[in-house]
Structures are given as C-alpha cells and as structure tokens.
Image (cartoon, rainbow, N blue to C red):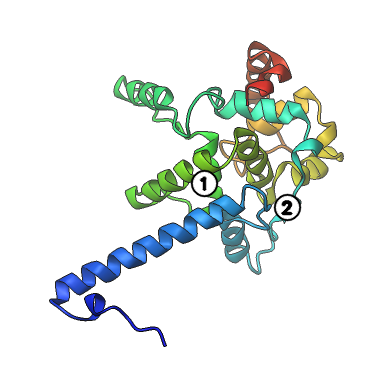
Amino acid sequence: MATISPILTKGPLWRRVLLWSALLVTLLALISVLLVASLRWVNPPTTAFMLQHNWQTRGSDETGPARHAWVSWDNISPQVALAVIAAEDQRFSQHKGFDFQSMGEAVRTYREGGRMRGASTISQQVAKNLFLWPGRNMARKAIEAYFTVLIEFLWPKQRVLEVYLNVAQFGPDVYGVEAASQAYFGKPASQLTPSEAARMAAVLPNPVRFRLDQPSDHVWQRQQWIERQMRQLGGTRHLERL
C-alpha cells in the first residue's frame, strides 16, 4: 500500500500546510493542462456559462434552457469568422492571447474622460466562457489569464476561433453560431451572408440587450461598421493568416 511521504506528515504545521498547498496547486495545474489540451480535439459538450444559464433560468417562463448545437469549422461560413474578428479582435492573428495595444488604448480613453471599454481578446473570451463565471474581480481575471495562456499555447488559432463561434452567446438563451443561425435566420451557419454575419457579430457585446430578432438602430449601425471593417481587413482572405 502506498504511503504518504513523511515530509508531508511531519514537521512544523506551517511547513506541512505549505507543502500540501503546493501539491494541490501542482495537481490542479496538471489537470487544467490536460483538460485544455484535450479540448484541442474534443468538442466541449457545454460551457460554464451555459451551465450557469441553465441553473439561473430553472422554472423561468421568460427564458428557457440554453439552445446550443456544435458545428465544425468546415460548416461555418467564413463570413461569420471574419465578422467576429472585425468586431471583437482585429489583431487576433497577431497577438498571443492578450492585445496590449487595445488595453493601452482603453485605459488612455478612460483617463481622457471617455467610457471604460473592454479589451478582451477572442482567446480571453473563450477562456471565460468555457471555464469561468461572470464578473470583474481580480481573482477571476487572474484565472482567465491563466487559461488564456494555456489555450494560446496548446491550440492553433483556427481552433480558438472555432470554439469561440460555438460557445459565444448570440441571444438570451442561444449559444453558438449554428443555433443562432437556425433561430434567427432559418438556415445553417454555413449559408450565412456577409450582412447576416455582421449582424450576428453586432450583438456580441451584450446579446441580451442587443437583439438579433429585434435589432435596434445601434445594432444596425454597428452592423454597417462591421461590414466596412470586414472589407478593410481584406475579406475572407484575412482568415488565411490564422
């Protein structure tokens, strides 16, 4: 029978606590690395955000359980992939998980009296949606950064974008590009047009407030801006950089 090392059971209490804590952290780190590595090939059946949605809406008459259907990269219109890059993370192909330039611009705008805006990359949003909970406290942001590093190190960019498109929320109870395309346009995600893709990307900052089925003037204006950005990025040829 295996025995526990005397190092972990003897000596001052503070040393034992420190050693057990180090062992626990090492074990959790190993599990997280194996989990993220496996998701390079295995499609996640759900996410932390979907589980929270289902828990919070139990018995609700207004919002039902999360609607979600996984679809492979080859069955997603390139227009959608381009649209979310144009809308959310135009330096996606260049950075290693963190867009420090956008972070600096956001801080500078805030200091000059503007509204504080988010600067999360697509990789950070994947980490948050898959593993974490909503919030802005430092502990959550630190864990998000840790998973972002793992995702960028262990996955190719195309896989990051594929997972993002499949887990992002596009409506009050709609997650993933396939479920959203079927719900709001009555067609598979592979057949979305540039304008439809841009409208889907336009609601991503807040898919509960900004609706695909009832687009506000802000959504229409943002859709037009995204379409212009898609053209300026060079169209779907931009995806060849991934």
* Residue positioned most to the left: 12
Residue where numbered disc 1 is placed: 127
Which quadrant: the N terminus? bottom left
Residue where numbered disc 2 is placed: 68
Is the residue 57 above or below the residue 228 in the image?
A: below
Expressed as whole percent of the image width and height from the top left, the position of residue 217 reads 65, 25
Quadrant in the picture for residue 156: top right
Instruction: Look at the numbered disc 1 and give the secondary structure of its residue.
Output: helix
Left or right: 91 with respect to 72? left
Which quadrant: the C terminus? top right
Local packing at callout 2 (Cα closer than 10 Å; few below 14, some 14-19, many 20+) is many
Q: Which amino acid does label 2 sit on?
A: His
Given residues 11 and 82, the one toward you in this image is 11
Expressed as whole percent of the image width and height from the top left, the position of residue 232 reads 64, 11
Q: Note whether residue 102 is visible.
A: yes
Instruction: Look at the numbered disc 2 and give the secondary structure of its residue.
Output: strand
Residue beneath the point at 87% across and 39% down? 187
Q: Which amino acid does label 1 sit on?
A: Ala
Expressed as whole percent of the image width and height from the top left, the position of residue 139 reads 34, 52
Residue beneath the point at 61% across and 44% down? 208
